[in-house]
Image (tube, grey):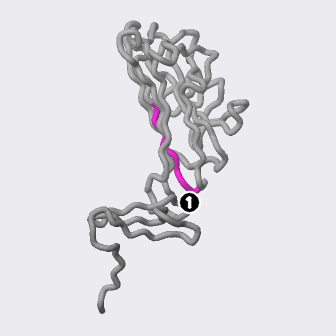
Amino acid sequence: MADFIIKSAAGTGNKTLIQGQDQSGSDYAIEIGDGGALKLGTITSGTFPAGHIIQCRGDRYNAKDDGGTVDVTQSTTTPFGTDLEVEITCSSTSNFLRVDVHIPDCYTGTNSGGFHLGVVQSTDNYSSYGGLPGTTGSDSNGQYIISPYNLYHANGTDIFPINSMVYCSVPTTSTMKIRPFLKSQQSETYELLSNHAAFSGHASVTVMEIQG
């Protein structure tokens, strides 16, 4: 059977454009350029293979520029506030979320306690919030996803980076804002990004929606 070929006129820079009924000029749904280079227009629907990253959002806190060190106490919940927050609207509760948190230079200042570290989400700008599916806890014991005794029995002068990841089902298709949750386990205060005066410390949160 002979091949059916659609191609633009010969000449460098000429493109083959496939357009929707309301497109014209250089607009395209699919563009084929030199060497078969393919570009797609905006994809508004469709199903990706399982495990495909549908979208990725992130935020970072630069201690030098955004406000210096951040303290964790028994009364804090989301001490970075809107300075370290990812807004995301997921497409389906059949999909999954991967949330990565990185916080550098956590200064213990003590060796008798620790703090809870976790991730929370809110659909009403933090008038209320809750944990992600599969995590446990409340304000009294932490929406934690790793040990609630981070830094427990560390040397009082040590400085640690904190990295954590949670993988869970998408809890809602409403727009949600995701923040790290941090609360001191006892009465001690912990200082985050403690070395920012000497180095430009960056805390970050990355959120990915993954096809289920």
Tell me the quarter of the image containing the N terminus. Answer: bottom left
Residue 146 visible, this orientation: no
Q: Is residue 146 magenta?
A: no
Q: For the point 68% across and 33% down, which residue is it?
A: 125
Residue 34 is situated, as x and y percent measured from the top left of the image, at 29, 64
Q: Main secondary structure of the magenta part?
A: strand
Residue 191 is situated, as x and y percent measured from the top left of the image, at 48, 12
In the image, is 209 to the left or to the right of 129? left
Q: Start and end of the magenta stretch?
A: 94-101
**Viewer-proximal residue, 64 or 71?**
64
In the image, is 34 to the left or to the right of 120? left
Q: For the point 43% across and 29% down, which residue is it?
A: 102
**Would you identify the image quadrant in which residue 44 lies?**
bottom right
**Viewer-proximal residue, 59 or 3?**
3
Residue 99 is situated, as x and y percent measured from the top left of the image, at 49, 39
Q: Is residue 167 above or below residue 15?
A: above
Residue 82 is situated, as x and y percent measured from the top left of the image, at 60, 26
Q: Residues within 10 Å of mark 1 (few under 14, many from 20)?
A: few
Judging from the image, what secondary structure is the residue with disc 1 in? loop
Q: Is residue 98 magenta?
A: yes
Q: Residue tagged by mark 1?
A: 44
Amino acid on which the number 1 mark rests in the picture: Thr
**Viewer-proximal residue, 27 or 77?**
27
Q: For the point 48% across and 33% down, which residue is it?
A: 205
**Would you identify the image quadrant in which residue 62 lies?**
top left
**Would you identify the image quadrant in which residue 199 lies?**
top left
Q: Is residue 1 above or below residue 79?
A: below
In the image, is 115 to the left or to the right of 5? right
Q: For the point 61% across and 18% down, which residue is it?
A: 76
